[in-house]
Amino acid sequence: MASYIVRRLGYMLITLVFVTVVGFFIIELPPGSYLEFHIQSLRQQGGDVTPDQIAALERRYGLGDPVHVRFYKWISGFPRGDFGQSFQHQRPVGELIWSRLGYTLLISVLTLIISWGIAIVVGVYSATHRYTIPDYLITVLQFIGLAIPNFLLALVMMIVLQQTFGMRVGVLYSREFRDAPFSIAKLLDLASNLWVPIVILGVAGTAWTSRVMRANLLDVLNMQYVQTARAKGVYEPKVIWKHAVRNALHPLVMTLGLALPGIISGEVIVSTVLNLPTSGPLFFQALIQQDMYLAGTFLVFFAVALLIGNLLADIMLAWLDPRITYR
Amino acid sequence: MTDITVEKIAAEAGEEISTVGEIPQSKLIWMRFSRNKLALVGGVGLIIMYIIVALGPFIASNHFRNQNQDYLYGPPTPVTFRGADGRLGLRPYTYEYITRLDQESFKFVFDFDRDTRLPLEFFVRGDEYELLGFIESNVHLVGVQGEQRFYPLGTDALGRDVFARLLVGGQVSLTVGLVGVALTIILGSVMGTISGYFGGAVDDVMQRVIELILSFPTVPLWAALAAALPPISRSFTAIHRFFLITVILSLVNWTGLARQLRGKVMGYAESDFVMAALAVGASDARIIFVHMMPNASSHIIVVAALAIPGMILGETALSFLGLGILPPAVSWGSMLTQAQAVPVVIEHPWLMTPGIAVVLAVLFYSFLGDALRDAADPYSI
Amino acid sequence: MTDQVSVQETDAGQQVEQPSAQGNIVEVRDLHTYFYTDLGVARALNGVTYNIPREKVLGIVGESGCGKSVTALSIMNLVQPPGKIVSGEVVLHRVGAKGANTEVVLTDLGRHSTQMRRIRGNEIAMIFQEPMTSLNPVYTIGDQISEAFILHQGVNKDEARRRSILILDRVGMPYADTVVDQYPHQLSGGMRQRAMIALGLSCAPSLLIADEPTTALDVTTEAQILDVMRGLQSDIGMSIMFITHDLGVIAQMADEVVVMYLGRVAEQAPVDSIFYDPLHPYTRALLRSIPHVGEGTKERLKPIRGVVPNPYSNISGCPFHPRCDEFMPDVCDVNVPGITMTEDGRAVRCFLYSDRVEKNG
């Protein structure tokens, strides 16, 4: 098992190298030099940029260098935590992204756990009550949940919460806790604000996962070993939960690798709409402003999160299914 | 023995099977599909949507770019069938509006004078437009004669007809899915088939590329690529941008289809009918296009149908964030950018109507895709 | 109609005590099991009547799709939706202490009822066709056998594990104490089927239903498995209902044989009678279609004409008449033959032997 994880980590590292290549490619992609854009924006802000400064900036980003040297300069800073400079914010990218990435991951992981918990129960219910009225009702809700774009849902939620409940959305902490040190009260305050993006994000995920769960379980329920369990005299709920569900979870965990990008994508959009201090707003702003080191670094870190997620999914799969050998 | 006889024998065998009480697979698929009521709803709903959208400039009373400076954020014009005499009739009327400055908010508000009725007329002449790209006309389905305009869904911040924009925007949003899926199918089936059929190093490279693409979350990747597109200019028109946006959307989507087809093709490569074709000396191309593709076609169709909603949602999200379809073009997503601020939406809820359109379109496509998937697996209970 | 078989069998002067209770462990009476699918109603069982004799092996033969497996599931009350037992009954005869017999109508018990669950795996056990898929891939062999012990004998985990090893040993599983901790995918097909048999026999059932237990195995393994089953059957003194489409296996295993065709029993008879004096034209046709050693090697095998009609079709009259060599126009295609009891106690459904007509056919 340990050597399997080590080998998987090795593969991950290789993929990571290619991920940074793609990230750099995207940084280089916008037409025109980002430095020009930067200098222009510096001038717009009223500051005067001296030729010395320009030369310094050019040196720093090696504009005169060939592509591979620039790439090397960018990634060689990674171990030191140097991901380049954000032109727009005039600060190192590293400083800007950590806390925001953290909240993005927190929201994403919480959403994943909660939506899976609900989805499994709902999926099992509708698979075992196929063609009943509640099953049809669940199916309708699933279709609707999948059809509503999450940014639209975020807008609607914002309106409803503000109009009917007078709730302030778009914050993670209430004003009094924003700069307070960590405490239980602060955590509760976070929870009281965090549920909004989690619900918005969770709707589509829950709808999708419960549909997958329903289909998987229906497949598994046709398997001979389920009949074997029944023929043994096992209590029907136990047949479902012990013998069928565990096998039905298997393909679901395999789709974890697909669910995670969806949730991170969703988080980025939803937090932009809600204007939460997570990756979303900063990332899109960076793209629109062509603040490419910031955007590219975000992209690389999203990919890292997905790679780790996939690794965890594989480990979970191995734990769930004894047939998987750690080759 | 030539190819022809092999196929003839197969065809005869197939015929015999169908006469002795078994139902051929294609018929089973169609039977199951046509019995699905949701599929019917989805199919009919989509046909209606596409027709309305295609005839949009004619159905809407105004040109979608026309700005009415006197009617900014104007509410939907009410319609009544009650005549001046207070009796219900067949002729629809609307009321004249009165602009008034609200003393508290210092904003212009619009009141409708319930006493002055303006008859709504059919086939009235109005703004010039071009239908389906070649029919030039100025006849609109309904409208009001004279100064006042008819806005069934109100106007936006610039005083443009929301209904007209909804229909024209629908042309973009509903086409993105189709064009994107066409690209997805082409890319996905070519790559998947090559990867599965030839295997080896080709397959390895292809799989690593797919893994790499899949290791990025979709929306941020789309957004990053879309952000790199040049701004709209004379040489890079809105059409160019639209096309490149769909290319970007299908750039991620093809990987799924390619992977599934690869698996299918690898399975077929072992199967008896491919062995038989190889034995009679059929070429690679013949095996792929004559023997494998028809077998995989139902699968391709299902994957394609299920991918369309994702494309539509992707375009909408990108445009909403200002990275997709840009002015002067309109799409449902770009219309919704105006609805980003809560106070604006609360005061002018009609700005959210494109959202309803998106949900409907996606819902109809999911009904269709789901029914296709269920039907393509005709031996399940 | 319901207890026609047993009543016919006995002479009028017999005792009040149910004669069938001594002879049969399970009686299946006019059982109808239908499947309500999208394509229509499939009448998998269309009035099935037969008896499973106590402490004997009943073989059930028939082509695929004739309802063999559905009968088994119907006895276990395990027919899953969209399938449903529509009418008829399955009666289990229990022999209590001092010869006090009780009978339980299994079809009256709920599919998920506690009573039914206590019977399943305990009094009646079942082995399925596919050893590859009939064991749960995510639990060890020991876990799966122990579950039955814990459920029906109320023992703790350690004791259940000990008993599992014993029973595995008893079915001839090599290295039983290792296998007990292995997962199904680590075993060969033959070993899995042994494990399944061990699971089936764990609580010493009075009836073991084996649904084509050896079809998926190679000939050598098949012989071993059949040996094990036969040996255990006489050791434990249980009945076996052995479902197969292989007449060779029937000859080897069965004491009595039920021949099924399209959801109905064609005939039930002792094994020797089936092979040497088949009554039903379908049984005869079946026997003609298998090769015989010795006699007339030049003779061609005679396959049965046509194919089994699909279960959705509604054939008028005797379901076998379109393929029957002894088809009598205006008789066989009009009415469904009822069950005729011969003098030596065999049951056959054919107009060649009487004019008895199925009432609700």
Image: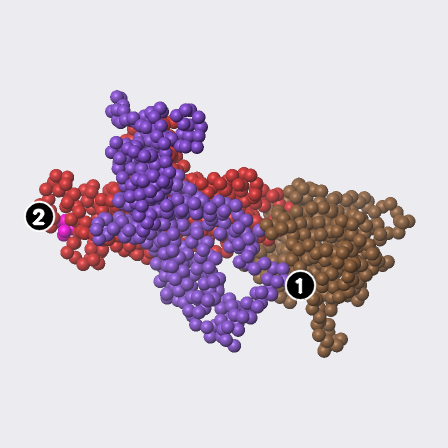
Tag on residue C307?
Answer: 1
Tag on residue A51?
Answer: 2
Q: Amino acid at mark 2?
A: Pro
Q: What residue do we see at 80% from left, 48% from top?
A: C1
Q: Chain of mark 2?
A: A
Q: Residue C293 magenta-drawn?
A: no
Q: Nearer the viewer, residue B127 or B66?
A: B127
Q: Amino acid at mark 1?
A: Val
Residue furthest front in the image:
B85
Q: Tell me, what hue is chain A?
A: red
Q: State the SS at label 2.
A: helix
Of badges 2 and 1, nearer the viewer stands 1
Residue furthest top in the image:
B103
Question: x, y percentage for residue C166?
Answer: 64, 54
Q: State the SS at label 1.
A: loop
Q: What residue do we see at 71% from left, 63% from top?
A: C323
Tell me, by letter, which chain the rendering colours brown: C
- Considering only vertical position in the picture, is A149 above or below C350? above
